[in-house]
Image (cartoon, rainbow, N blue to C red):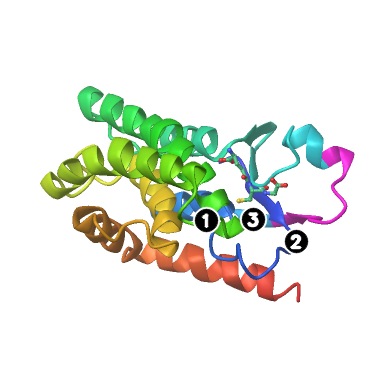
């Protein structure tokens, strides 16, 4: 068995704690029961070695033996290939899980990330920019997602990496009160975050950053 090492920042400010994307990787590793180590890279002075692993100087990345993987979606796909608790074996369900993984990142997070940046910036809710971003997220992404999540427990039948990514994307939307009109999204998020693997991953991330204070 090759050694898995997850690298994240040594420290981050209070606000993003609990939401740093290493949580997605921790969550997947905990779901699969895979052994791993966590290493730190400086948040303030990003090294050349950091950029060699993650070209944008971001976190996280994962090493698996002599492979180094960046982008949380790519890392989760890699782990999914290693463990069927993360990616179903049935070809149709496996294909659905991959499609929903990309939907979480490329359709929902692509809308929720600029929305959250505007929300954190304190932009007035009366501006055209806010109304455009808010409408794009809610009308074109959350509204169609709502009946999907009302109709099924998990996106691809059984719990998978697609749910880790979709739930983690929705967590930030929920933190900024964007799920108020979407009860099925909220219920799905509650189901996902009630899983022991999420609880452990979240607690471990909080402890990791608290240890650096
Ligand atoms: N698309 C990347 C995004 C990674 C990302 O945004 N990481 C944040 C932490 S959650 C980060 O490194 N922020 C610091 C920065 O961008 O300088 C992924 O999913 O891995």
In depth, the one of 2 and 156 nearer the eye is 156
Contact (Cβ within 8 Å) of mark 3 with mark 2: no
The residue at 24%/42% (across/down) is: 143
x and y, in percent, of residue 171 in the image? 41, 57
Instruction: Give the residue number, with chain letter if any, for mark 3.
Output: 37
Does the segment drawn in magenta span residue 48? yes
Lateral position of residue 109 relative to residue 208, left or right: left
Note whether 205 is above or below 155 in the view shown: below
**Residue occupying the point 87% across, 44% down:** 47
The quadrant in which the C terminus is found is: bottom right
Q: Give the magenta-colored segment's residue range.
A: 39-49
Please give the residue where the numbered disc 1 appears in the rendered image: 119
Q: Earlier in the sequence, mark 3 or mark 2?
A: 2
Q: Which residue is mark 2?
A: 10
Q: Is residue 111 left or right of residue 158?
A: right
> At which x and y percent is residue 74?
53, 32
Which image quarter: residue 84? Answer: top left
Mark 1 Cα shell of 10 Å, populated few (<14), some (14-19), many (≥20): some
Q: Is mark 2 within 8 Å of ligand 1?
A: no
Q: Position of residue 122 (x, y in %)?
A: 58, 60
| Residue occupying the point 52% across, 57% down | 124
Answer whether residue 161 is visible to the viewer in this image: no
Label located before the other in sequence (2 or 1): 2
Find residue 22 and name its label: none
């Amino acid at each position: 068995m090759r050694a898995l090492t997850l690298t994240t920042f040594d420290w981050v400010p209070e606000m993003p704690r609990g939401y740093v994307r290493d949580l997605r990787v921790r969550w997947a590793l905990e779901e699969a029961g895979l052994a791993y180590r966590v290493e730190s890279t400086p948040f303030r002075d990003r090294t050349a070695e950091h950029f060699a692993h993650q070209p944008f100087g971001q976190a996280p990345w994962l090493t698996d033996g002599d492979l180094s993987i960046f982008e949380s979606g790519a890392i989760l796909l890699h782990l999914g290939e290693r463990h069927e608790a993360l990616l179903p074996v049935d070809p149709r369900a496996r294909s659905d899980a991959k499609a929903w993984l990309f939907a979480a990142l490329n359709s929902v997070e692509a809308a929720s990330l600029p929305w959250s940046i505007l929300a954190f910036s304190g932009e007035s809710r009366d501006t055209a920019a806010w109304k455009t971003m808010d409408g794009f997220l809610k009308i074109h992404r959350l509204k169609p997602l709502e009946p999907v999540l009302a109709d099924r427990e998990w996106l691809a039948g059984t719990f998978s990496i697609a749910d880790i990514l979709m739930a983690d994307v929705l967590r930030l939307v929920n933190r900024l009160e964007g799920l108020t009109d979407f009860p099925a999204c909220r219920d799905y998020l509650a189901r996902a975050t009630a899983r022991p693997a999420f609880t452990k991953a979240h607690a471990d991330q909080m402890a990791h950053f608290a240890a650096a204070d």
